[in-house]
């Protein structure tokens, strides 16, 4: 583990410093991890984001899973499970996908993508957010979902 200062050009570090870059603010957070909803202002984002697309991130600028401390790894796993549970119980997901890609922003962010009931089979997994009838929204719709999720507790 390094104690280098967070890079100023990292979108994830920037969003942890300026929570207005997270729709509705962080859904949950602790001293090691921040959970938020995808922002329309994220790199490569669109005005209408897939509702329920959550990100689980270590606070520390660690590029990938292999760079986490054991404590961070345990916490990232715990928050993935808690967030997935809330997406199912509160967000209406029938299933939650998890993925680490990291080709563009070198600060670990685990993507959690709900699959909603009725999603046609051809959209399962990596195309789940391309289903034309999938729920999408801007900052305010994402913030409303964040409020519902966080109100349900951890
Ligand atoms: Zn970073």
Image (spheres, rainbow, N blue to C red):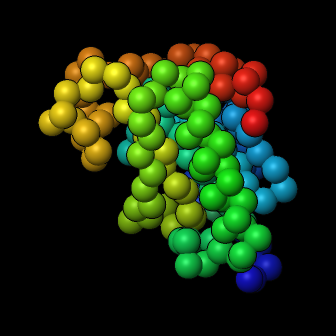
Horizontal placement of 76 versus 114: left or right? right
Identify the image quadrant of residue 104. Answer: bottom left
Quadrant of the rendering where the C terminus is positioned: top right
Q: Residue at (25%, 39%) from the top-left corner?
A: 124
Horizontal placement of 137 versus 75: left or right? left
Horizontal placement of 71 versus 36: left or right? right
Q: Position of residue 52 (x, y in %)?
A: 49, 30
Q: Position of residue 96 (x, y in %)?
A: 45, 40
Identify the image quadrant of residue 70. Answer: bottom right
Is residue 8 visible in the rendered image? The answer is no
| Front in this rendered view, residue 5 or 93 | 93
The residue lying furthest to the bottom in this view is 1
Q: Position of residue 122 (x, y in %)?
A: 15, 36
Is residue 124 visible in the rendered image? The answer is yes
Identify the image quadrant of residue 22. Answer: top right
**Where on the image, by quarter, is ligand 1?**
bottom right
Residue 120 position (above or below residue 102) = above
The residue lying furthest to the right in this view is 31
| Front in this rendered view, residue 83 or 23 | 83
Residue 122 position (above or below residue 14) = above
Q: Residue at (40%, 61%) from the top-left corner?
A: 101
Quadrant of the rendering where the N terminus is positioned: bottom right
Q: Residue at (69%, 21%) from the top-left corner?
A: 147
Residue 51 position (above or below residue 126) = above
Q: Residue at (70%, 65%) from the top-left corner?
A: 74
| Front in this rendered view, residue 96 or 2 | 96
Q: Position of residue 2 (x, y in %)?
A: 75, 83
């Amino acid at each position: 583990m390094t104690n280098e200062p967070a890079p100023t050009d990292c979108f994830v570090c920037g969003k942890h410093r300026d929570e207005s870059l997270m729709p509705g603010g962080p859904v949950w957070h602790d001293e090691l991890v921040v959970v938020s909803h995808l922002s329309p202002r994220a790199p490569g984002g669109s005005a209408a984001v897939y509702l329920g697309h959550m990100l689980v991130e270590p606070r520390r600028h660690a590029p990938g899973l292999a760079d986490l401390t054991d404590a961070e790894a345990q916490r990232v796993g715990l928050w993935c499970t808690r967030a997935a549970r809330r997406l199912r119980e509160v967000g209406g997901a029938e299933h939650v996908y998890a993925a680490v890609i990291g080709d563009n922003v070198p600060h670990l962010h685990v993507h959690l993508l709900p699959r909603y009931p009725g999603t046609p089979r051809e959209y399962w997994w990596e195309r789940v957010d391309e289903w034309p009838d999938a729920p999408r929204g801007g900052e305010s719709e994402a913030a409303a979902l964040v409020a519902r999720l966080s109100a349900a507790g951890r």
